[in-house]
Amino acid sequence: MSVPALSINPTAKAPPAELMPMMRGPILAGGLIAVAFFGIFGGWAALAPLSTGAVASGFVSPASKPQVIDNKEGGILRAILVSEGERVAAGTPLVQLDKTQAEASYASGTDQLMRQRTIGARIQAEQSGALDWSLPIEVVAAMAVQPALYAFVESQKSLLEANLRYMSVSGEVADQQIAQLQSDITSLEAEIAGLREQKASIDQEVVRMSALMERQLVARSQVEPLIRQQVQYEADLQVRQSRIARTRQNMLEIEARQRQTEDELRQGLEKEATAVNNQIVVLSHQISAAQDILERTIVTSPVDGVVNNIRFNTAGGSVAAGQPILDVIPVDDEPVIMAQLSPSDIDYVEVGLPARVTLPAFSSRHLPQLQAHVTYVAADRTFDELTRQYSYAIHVAVPAEELKKYDISLQPGMQADVTVVAGSRTLLQYLTQPIFRAIDTAFVKD
């Protein structure tokens, strides 16, 4: 069946005049409808606000950076205790390093510390002069498992007994010497007393005989022997008095030597005690450091996270000091979206602005845009060598309540599209902005 062709006759006449009143109504209604439509649309375009913002793309990342696990001292790798992708809690052992050297260092330091504490106890006993001494509790406990320490304690006990015996004998000898000298003084004083009595008798006889000699009743030869004897008694008295003085001086010297010996012993003990205390402090720090190194031979996870990028496959390898062993990606931190923003949109974006996040991994029918906010804006742009473009880094956080509302979780590495809501403009402003920009540019002189 053929369709007749439509032809237009330019010479066709206008509608008859009687049809004009019938067409006026529809034409007027159509005009009114058009005016109303464009009026309403124009008013809405000029008054109704539309959100304006900046669009950026990025990915989900933990708020904390991945934890690079290493060991400060390094060593021989004995065992890898976790596997790639395994979720671990904070404090979970990850790697076991050889601890032979660390244990030897800790044991050596501990043994030296116990010995120094034993010496300190012996010095205290010497200072107090007590033969019975009390050892620190930790030394007594260590003696039960360290025969060498037990022998050292016994040697210090013998040294204590010898030193106390020396101090005692030294004091006793000095006391005996002083007692003997005091006895000599007592004897000399007794002799002096006897000599004085005899001299007094001779003095009286010399006086009597001298008087008789003056009266020529006796000869001089009878008086002179008495005078000589008188002089001898005087000399004997002076000799004994001198001996008493020398003996007293000897007593003072012995007492001084004894005090000097005691002072030297006391000062020696004080000096030794100071050295021991200093050594104890040094050893305590060394043991603390050795214990820390020993504990670090078991490398633990600092955070709850997922094991990633294990760099060693077998045990027995050598790990250098500070060399990365594996990574732990935190999972319990509130995740953030790290996005790259075009430099042309940086004027619209600042910390605290609301944002809308779309996750391409989820269907838009089941998951609408998530409400979020900007938490960080880079101070300067960076250049991406891969895309050869500049961009500003921004961080966007999605509240936990928003994630809980839709029963989803953000996994590290998940792609995300971000729209930062920077304000609002009308549709008319959107449509006229390019025109005004073109006009501004057109009047700029090259």
Image (cartoon, grey):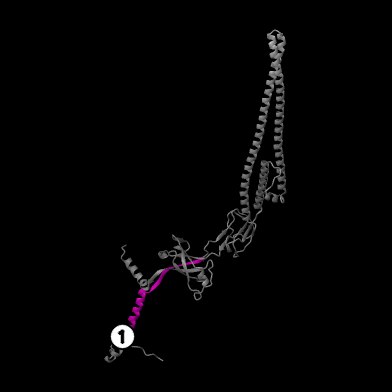
Q: Residue furthest left?
A: 17
Q: Residue at x 70, y 29 (%)?
A: 182
Q: Residue at x 32, y 85 (%)?
A: 29
Q: In the rendered image, is residue 389 in sight?
A: no
Task: Provide the residue designation for mark 1.
Answer: 28
Side (left or right) of 217 relative to 7: right
Up/down of 134 relative to 256, above or below: below
Residue 125 pos. (x, y %): 68, 43
Side (left or right) of 371 relative to 161: left
| Amino acid found under the numbered disc labelled 1 | Leu
Quadrant of the snapshot with the N terminus: bottom left
Q: In the rendered image, is residue 416 in sight?
A: yes
Q: Nearer the viewer, residue 19 or 108?
A: 108
Side (left or right) of 424 relative to 195: left
Under circle 1, the secondary element is helix
Q: Nearer the viewer, residue 69 or 389?
A: 69
Q: Which residues are magenta?
A: 32-60
Q: Nearer the viewer, residue 88 or 179?
A: 179
Residues packed near mark 1 inside 10 Å, few (<14), some (14 to 19) or many (20 plus): few
25 in the magenta segment: no
Q: Residue at x 71, y 18 (%)?
A: 201
Residue 88 pos. (x, y %): 60, 64
Which quadrant of the figure has residue 178? top right
Residue 244 pos. (x, y %): 68, 25
Quadrant of the snapshot with the C terminus: bottom left
Up/down of 230 relative to 305, above or below: above
Q: Nearer the viewer, residue 72 or 158?
A: 158
Up/down of 113 relative to 82, above or below: above
Which quadrant of the figure has residue 229? top right
